[in-house]
Image (spheres, rainbow, N blue to C red):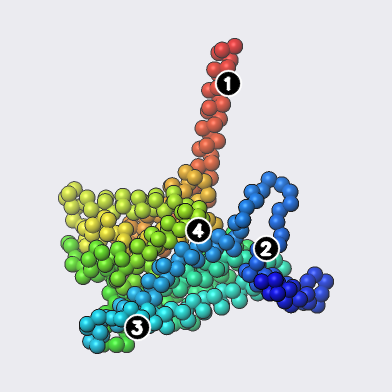
Amino acid sequence: MEWIRQKLDKFREPFNKGNKFEKYAPAINALDTFLYTPNHTTQKGAHVRDAVDLKRTMITVVLALVPALIFGMWNGGYQYLHQLPEYADGVPFLEAFMHGAWKILPMIAVSYGVGLGIEFAFAIFRGHEVNEGYLVTGLLIPMIMPIDIPLWMVALSVIFAVVIGKEAFGGTGMNILNPALTARAFAFFAYPTYMSGNQVWVSEATTVDGVSGETILGTLASAGKGVAEVPYSVMDMFSGVIPGSIAETSTICVLAGALVLVLTKVGSWRIILSGFVGAAVMALIFNALPNMGIEGNALTNFPWYQHLIIGGLSFGIVFMATDPVSAAQTLRGKWIYGFLIGLFGVMIRVFNPAYPEGIMLAILLMNVFAPVIDHYVIEANINRRKKRAVSVSGQIKTAA
């Protein structure tokens, strides 16, 4: 690899300080740090020195997303093909995967192309280095979109997320909202007919007769009171062989990614665990309403454990709520933050039939309140230590 190093050093000479293209150095440095370990490290001060940097952290998250992405490509093709008469006897894996990949890979290319272009432009304009944070955001945005959303909508959503949701606050590490969810929120409120309904979740559902894309949450939300029949088994829900956003349907793949994040200590297991607990508690409360003489609807009567494995709840808790920038930072704050995300996610899902997928709004809401949670956790610790100090001081005086 030494010859690559030499070629790269020679290529970047015009971009070094004092040379003709010095202004564009951040763009070249980004390529350098993507291929090699950054050549600058701390020399003094109280810093932890190890082999982990932002690039490795982001790549770890990308690797954790790969199982859900690959399954999403296959499921995206399968949900369309298995409804066609010519595939009544079964859908070959490769055909389903290729159909899904044909739809999804262009979205990923647009997301990275537009997002990285904006990041490079801001880095050159501000004179700072390009950060690797968009490695994850650029992949997450397509993964949480409907499979047939137009590419220009993906591009506009990326522009809004990067410029308004991230760069306006100072760039990587300064944003208060999760950028990927900011993109999805923009697309949802700007183009609701492309982000909701029964025909946006399955490829070609709007153009091919007989192809349906109704999700489980859509079925429950439109069922009204009582108990609704869902045409999928619990194993279908858990494995992810159901309609939905590109990569959020498979709880198995999401949990595999969660295991990677937890074992590498990139994602907070406290947020993940408390998020699922909060969702379970809220779902159990709704399940208990009939026993209290309160008539519920199809969503309140839906078994609590099935709430955890449908929609984007598990994907949101594992990959969005654990964003280290927009999440709570204190240990106790992470428990509170995750619990409230799960709680509000199911609450919004049940009380808002027009938008049965509530995890996006729940995470964005708690992103805003994360600093408040940390503030009161820290204040509580300070007050507790003050009381302890007063108590110890009184005991010393008594002993004296």
What is the number of callouts on the image?
A: 4
Q: According to the image, label 2 marks what residue?
A: 38
Q: Is residue 303 left or right of residue 390?
A: left
- The extreme top residue here reads 400
**Vertically, is 327 above or below 239?**
above
Q: Earlier in the sequence, mark 4 or mark 2?
A: 2
The x and y percentages for residue 42 are: 71, 53
Which numbered disc, 2 or 1, marks the residue closer to the eye?
2
Q: Is residue 54 left or right of residue 247?
A: right
Q: According to the image, label 4 marks what residue?
A: 323
Q: 155 and 331: which one is in front? A: 331
Find numbered disc 3 in the image and state the secondary structure of the residue it sits on.
helix
Q: Quadrant of residue 378?
A: top right
Spatial separation of the CA atoms under disc 3 and disc 1: 75 Å
Q: Quadrant of residue 78?
A: bottom left
The x and y percentages for residue 337 are: 44, 50
CB of mark 3 within 8 Å of CB of mark 4? no
- The extreme front residue here reads 2
CB of mark 2 within 8 Å of CB of mark 3? no
| Residue drawn at point x = 24 percent, y = 88 percent | 86
Q: Quadrant of the C terminus?
A: top right
**Vertically, is 232 above or below 153?**
above
Q: Is residue 147 left or right of residue 265?
A: left
| Residue drawn at point x = 57 percent, y = 61 percent | 56
Q: Earlier in the sequence, mark 1 or mark 4?
A: 4
| Residue drawn at point x = 26 percent, y = 55 percent | 304
Which numbered tag is attached to residue 95?
Answer: 3
Q: Is residue 181 visible?
A: no
Spatial separation of the CA atoms under disc 3 and disc 4: 35 Å
Spatial separation of the CA atoms under disc 4 and disc 2: 23 Å
Amino acid bearing label 2: Pro
Which numbered tag is attached to residue 393?
Answer: 1
